[in-house]
Amino acid sequence: MKPSGIGGQAVLEGIMMRNKNKYSVAVRKPDQTIALKVDEYKGLTSGKKIIGLPFIRGIFNFIDSMVLGIKTLAYSAEFYEEEEEVKESKMDKAVDKLFKEKAEDVIMGVTIFISIVIALGLFVVLPSVISDLLKNWFDIISVSVLSIIEGVIRIALFIIYILLISMMKDIKRTFMYHGAEHKCINCIENGMELNVENVMKSSRYHKRCGTSFIFMVMIISIIFFIFIRVGNPVLKIVVRLLLIPVIAGVSYEFIRLAGRSESKIVNILSKPGMLLQKITTSEPDEDMVEVAIEAVSAVFDWKEYLANYDKEESVKDDEDGKEES
């Protein structure tokens, strides 16, 4: 398996795929045709050596992923908002009048801010509060045990959350497109031509996935919080919030390594995150795979990639033959 470096996410009835500074969004429109948008997104880490350093780059890459993800999700939603066009146009006029050319950036910033606040409240503050209550109820003295309990609560809340949203019709289809995205990447990274037949038989699980990243953040946070101990409940929450960028940076480096390594240890450590992908991905239909192929082909020259892939495999086979002789 040869890493491609491309990645993406599912959007509403479509796929966003990114390759370096170039990204594409392919959406299956209500009339069943495919709309394709190709653009550039340089992000925070582009051209900045300090921000691009290991453990630091993960923080800013995560922010970039959120910004681009919300931006492309909003684009895909435009094809399915005809019924609310009048209502939303009034809101758009008010926002445009107030913020003018910066209106889109303001909406994006507010959306990201609200998303982060909700996520921090649900997966950082709430588990900490619950673990403190359990400490008082059951007289748990060991800080290490309490940190593990807090981590388990955090993971449980995350699993419950994705199970609940997976019951929604739109989310079910989004998870199918998520599966199509993974299957496309696995198809080419395993040296197969990118077509519907090959993609359909490829795996929908991938080590370099956002689900795996979030799960790794939760696991690494348990380790951090065992050794970084704070007694005051309020100060403990503050410390946990301040440590999130550090934990995200470490988690990013592991996911980056996992996407490039076939080490048995790395594969074992990647298993829990990939198991969670059983919930966040589903088997797509052929129409969804067609959309994913459009998105990949728009930003990634998979034919050239496969040509080099075959050359590398030939060199590897020749070296193996020499060793045997």
Image (cartoon, grey):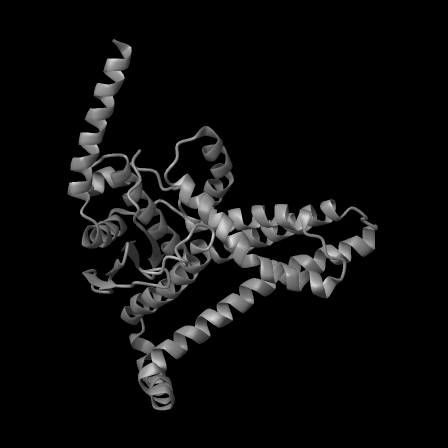
Residue 318: % across, % down: 21, 19
Is residue 276 left or right of 82 when viewed as pictured?
A: right
Question: Which residue is found at the position 33% from the left and 62% from the top?
Answer: 12
Residue furthest toward the front?
50
Question: Which residue is found at the position 32% from the left and 73% from the top?
Answer: 81
| Number of numbered discs on residues | 0
- Is 2 drawn above or below residue 95 in the view shown? above
Residue 257: image quadrant is: top left
Q: If the image is split into quadrants, where does the C terminus sit?
A: top left
Q: Nearer the viewer, residue 108 or 144?
A: 144
Is residue 197 left or right of 227 when viewed as pictured?
A: left
Asked whether residue 277 is in view, the answer is no
Asked whether residue 197 is in view, the answer is yes
Q: If the image is split into quadrants, where does the N terminus sit?
A: top left
Is residue 231 left or right of 72 when viewed as pictured?
A: right
Question: Which residue is found at the position 59% from the left and 62% from the top?
Answer: 242
Residue 75: % across, % down: 30, 68
Residue furthest toward the top?
325
Residue 223: image quadrant is: top right
Residue 164: % across, % down: 52, 56
Residue 149: % across, % down: 69, 48
Question: Which residue is found at the position 49% from the left and 67% from the top?
Answer: 115
Q: Nearer the viewer, residue 212 or 323?
A: 323
